Amino acid sequence: MTDSTLKRHFTGDCARELAERILPVLPSFDAEGFVREVDEAVGPLELKDRVRALAEGVRSRLPESYPEAVDVLVRSLGPELPDAEGTMSAAWFLMPVARFVEIYGLQHPETSLAALDAITRRHTAEYAIRPSMCAGPSPTVSTTSPRTTQRAHSQRQRSGWSRAPRIGRAGSSGTDCAH
C-alpha cells in the first residue's frame, strides 16, 4: 500500500471507526462532530496531515487531562494482534492514536510509553516514539531496552525503538530530531 493509497483511508470513515471504539469507554464523546470535522478537514491534506487532523479532532473531545485522555484511548484500542500480521491491514486506523501520543504526550513520558507499548501490540508506534527519544534517552531506553530478550513480535518491535538508526539521541547530527 503506498502513501497515496493509505491516505485515502484517513477520512470521516476512520473517524467513525475510532469513535465507535471510544464511545463505550467515553459515552459523552462527540462522535458525529468528530466525523464531520475530519471529513471537512482532510480533503486536500496528505497522509501525515490527515493523521494529525484525526489526532487533533480526538484531542478536542477527550478529557483535558492528558493521562485521562490517553487512558480512554488505550482502553478503546481493541484486541492485541498475535504477531506482525495485520498491523497495517487490520489496525491501520490506530495511526492517529499513536500520533495523539506523539503530539500531546511528551510531558508525560511514563504514561506515553505505556500507551505506545499498548498501541504496538496492535499497530506501530515507530514514529510516535521519536520525540521521546529526541528529548532524551531516559526513561525511554530503560523502558525499551529490556524487551530485547522477549519473543513476541510486538515486544521485539518495541525493543528496537531505542536503537532505530534515524532517531539517534538529542543533539546528535543526522537524526530526525530537528523538526
Image (tube, rainbow, N blue to C red):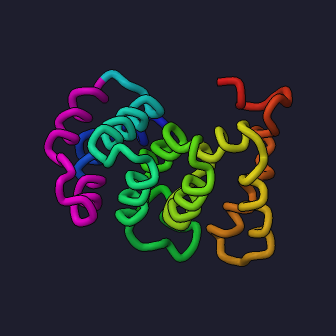
Up-down: is 150 above or below 65? below
Residue occupying the point 78% across, 68% down: 146
In this view, the residue farthest toward the right is: 172
Between 22 and 84, which is closer to the camera in this rendering?
22
Residue 152: x %, y % from top left: 66, 76
Q: Quadrant of the C terminus?
A: top right
Q: Is residue 83 left or right of residue 74?
A: right
Among the 4 quarters of the image, the one containing residue 79:
bottom left
Per the image, is 138 magenta?
no
Up-down: is 57 above or below 142? above
Residue occupying the point 67% across, 43% down: 132
Between 83 and 169, which is closer to the camera in this rendering?
169
Residue 28: x %, y % from top left: 17, 54
Residue occupying the point 79% across, 34% down: 170
Q: Is residue 155 left or right of residue 93?
A: right
Write down the region rendered in magenta: 17-43
Between 83 and 28, which is closer to the camera in this rendering?
28
Residue occupying the point 62% across, 50% down: 109
Most common secondary structure along the magenta stretch: helix
